[in-house]
Amino acid sequence: MALIVQKFGGTSVKDRSRIYNVARIVADTRNAGNDVVVVVSAQGDTTDDLIEKAAEITSNPSAREMDMLLATGEQISIALLTMALNEIGCPAISLTGWQAGFKTDRAYTKARIHRMDTERLESELGRGRVVVCAGFQGINRMDDITTLGRGGSDTSAVAIAAALHADRCQIFTDVEGVYTADPRKIPNAKKLKEITFDEMLELASLGAQVLNNRSVELGKKYGVEMEVLSSLNPMPGTIVREVCKDMEGMLIKGVARDDDVAVISILEVPDRPGMSFKVFGSLAQKKINVDIILQSTGRNGNKDLTFTVPAKDAELAVACLKENSGRIGSSDIHVNRDVAKVSIVGAGMQSHAGVASTMFEALYEANINIMMISTSEIKISVILDKKDAEQAVRAIHSAFVH
Ligand code: ASP
Ligand code: MG
């Protein structure tokens, strides 16, 4: 007998028929002889609707009251799913986040889980019941309801799996797993059998939003293997784990495109100690995240600095550099928003030569120019013209995934 945590997202419980669909998956898992803890999100767009309701009242709601409001969404789901389970003969009980023992810090609307008190969960399991827990919510030291931030139910599921040493943590969603590229755009994108936590984190930060990032970080920290699979088409999905045994001969796990990027250049900056500090220090003060940085070799005592920032921060970054141009020693600032970042991610590139050159060759054959390059142990990113991005993803994908 195994202990299995199953999490179902908002689309998986959005109406009566989906709730019964979930109830049958859960009941089948229990009838196969397992203990089951279920974590659910709010139905469909409920959380967005609640946020809108608050906006009708005030443009500046207190964070504590937002959590009081948003937590109601998940409470609807747990009650309805538990009724459905009971209806089909599966003994079950619902627990809110605080009943299930999620103890969080006091940061309303973005709380972090401090501790899980699992007595209630364990005693209900001991009585042979399926336990249906509200995701996304907990309680702080003041006995106030807190929520974990948007998409937080994934994190709730992993936290329960870690605390109960569950054998498996399944994240059911509306896609069949993690793909090598967006399957809506790249028809021959392949579903992965496995992916490492680190690869998943890189892909998520590049915009592949299958799993909430914090849940993957938590999974990595506590060694909780996660499986991403579809609630509508029940077949094996993608396993997220520390190390993948079978690399499936795949050097890379995914190609991702990120359009939320702008390139900023500041030219002819006097080349002396402290130059980078003055530029990036002033941006850091404005909390602007800089990603790729290129510094030219000096000429005539000057250097050019080129770097990327999130597109939404470009204006602020330029204003900030202009403000500090006296200190920096240059006001020759340029910004290019017609760019995109295309990246490949794969732990396989650590032990295989030639991955970068395959990527660059694919771009060369498609006659696409690269503006900037950056690499990490398991990722290579290039900045290119936005109009080339789609073709670039396709060319790179077909160079690696057959
Ligand atoms: N219902 C919350 C949200 O929509 C939490 C979740 O779905 O995981 O963000
Ligand atoms: Mg949701």
Image (tube, grey):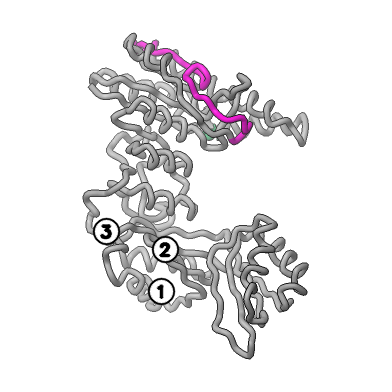
- 1 vs 296, left or right, is left
> What amino acid does circle 2 point to?
Ser
Mark 1–mark 2 distance (CA, rounded to whole Å): 19 Å
Viewer-nearest residue: 12 or 286: 286
The numbered dot on residue 250 is 3
Q: Is residue 83 above or below residue 356?
A: above
- Residue at 71 percent of width and 63 percent of height: 315
Which residue is labeled 2 in the image?
376
Q: Is residue 209 above or below residue 6?
A: below
- 327 vs 202, left or right, is right
| Residue 178 percent location from the top left of the image | 37, 47
**Badge 3 or badge 2: first in the primary sequence:** 3
What SS does tag 1 mark?
Answer: helix
Give, as a single range, the part of the protein colored magenta.
86-110
Question: Are discs 3 and 2 less than 8 Å apart at CB?
Answer: no
- Residue at 77 percent of width and 29 percent of height: 57
1 or 2: mark nearer the eye: 2
Can residue 357 be spotted in the picture? yes
The image quadrant of residue 343 is: bottom left
Magenta residues, dominant SS class = loop
Can residue 229 be spotted in the picture? no
Which residue is labeled 1 in the image?
363
> What amino acid does circle 3 point to?
Met
Q: Is mark 3 within 8 Å of ligand 1?
A: no
> What amino acid does circle 1 point to?
Leu
The image quadrant of residue 402 is: bottom left
- 358 vs 308, left or right, is left
Q: Is mark 2 within 8 Å of ligand 1?
A: no
The image quadrant of residue 146 is: top right
Question: Are discs 1 and 2 less than 8 Å apart at CB?
Answer: no
